[in-house]
Amino acid sequence: MAQHSIALKERKAVADGTELFVFEKPEGFQYKAGQYVALIVPKIAGVETDTKGLARSFSLTSAPCEPILSFTMRSGESAFKKTCWQLAIGDTVTITDPVGFFTLPPTEDTRPIVFLAGGIGITPVRSMLKQAESEKSQRQFTLLYANRFPKDVTFHEDIKKLSLKNLRYVTVLSQSTEPCASSDDERGYIDEAIIEKYVDDVQGSLYYIVGSPEFIGAMETMLTRLGVPKEQCKKDSFTGLRAQSGK
Ligand SMILES: Cc1cc2nc3c(=O)[nH]c(=O)nc-3n(C[C@H](O)[C@H](O)[C@H](O)COP(=O)(O)OP(=O)(O)OC[C@H]3O[C@@H](n4cnc5c(N)ncnc54)[C@H](O)[C@@H]3O)c2cc1C
């Protein structure tokens, strides 16, 4: 598989302990919204290494219509994450060609799409919605976005600003007594009642589930209880990502 060396152009915090890394896009690099790559960071002098190595899988946060490539990640204690947090503008990392099938169906398939995203699982969803906006998509989208607190909600303003005619965006906060400003907002976990409240055609929609393996398992069990056929559920399991707990 081809590898590409890409230079960091910009980085910024986009939620609590969550960083957006923006890179130059190599000439001819093509991908579909929702795909991912392996990201390999260089050894930086003074940053410790560990047995887990310096490569991880990352969904592209950027959309194919954008002139850059971007990735977004939660901070962590691994050598990989510590190295990422030391990256300076102009530093280069290596990525592989994009892979994965967590992508939207062709436009002829007009079934409504329901995204069930947990935490940093928002990354491929942001890419798909941004691309859909650039294509002036008329498709019905519902995004149910689960987090613990408002500070964990990533790309909140970006998503609210999207000019998609048929996007319904709902934040679902499990451990907050405060609302998530100016969006439809629920307390607790994404469950049958929330699905039935916000999804018009529960059994006829396509579900895109993305987040930690624990989140995916919980969503699959719930959709089975609602009678949604397995063939209508696409999954993007962020293996390696541990479910968050506490504050
Ligand atoms: C398709 C896909 C897309 C993803 N997209 C994103 C994204 O957009 N943003 C994001 O933040 N995360 C994403 N992840 C998760 C990401 O790849 C990391 O697993 C996650 O960020 C945690 O990394 P860490 O270094 O903090 O955790 P760590 O727990 O330190 O490392 C996790 C990784 O190390 C491996 N590992 C654990 N122990 C060992 C060991 N002893 N020896 C060797 N390997 C070991 C695990 O298999 C796992 O790959 C994605 C994962 C997948 C599969």
Image (cartoon, helix red, strand yellow):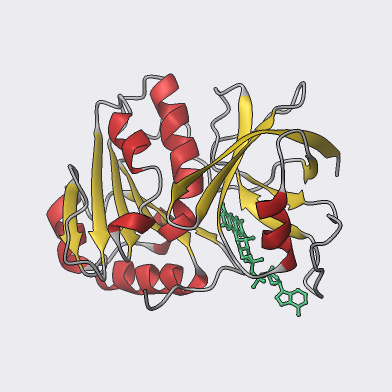
Q: Nearer the viewer, residue 182 or 240?
A: 182
- Residue at image point 35% right, 74% down: 221
Residue 26 position, x and y percent, is 76, 26
Residue 208 position, x and y percent, is 42, 52
- Residue at image point 51% right, 71% down: 213
Q: Is residue 226 left or right of residue 241?
A: left
Q: Nearer the viewer, residue 113 or 65?
A: 65
Q: Is residue 129 left or right of residue 146?
A: right
Residue at the limit of the structure toward the front, as seen here = 46
Q: How many marks?
A: 0
From the image, which quarter does the C terminus lie in? bottom left
From the image, which quarter does the N terminus lie in? top right
Q: Is residue 235 left or right of residue 166?
A: right
**Do we see residue 107 in this rendering?**
no
- Residue at image point 77% right, 71% down: 52
Residue 104 position, x and y percent, is 47, 39
Q: Quadrant of residue 111?
A: top left
Q: Quadrant of residue 43?
A: bottom right
- Residue at image point 32% right, 70% down: 224
Q: Is residue 33 above or below residue 120?
A: above
Residue at the limit of the structure toward the bottom, as seen here = 246
User: In terms of image quarters, where does ligand 1 lie?
Assistant: bottom right
Residue 214 position, x and y percent, is 46, 74
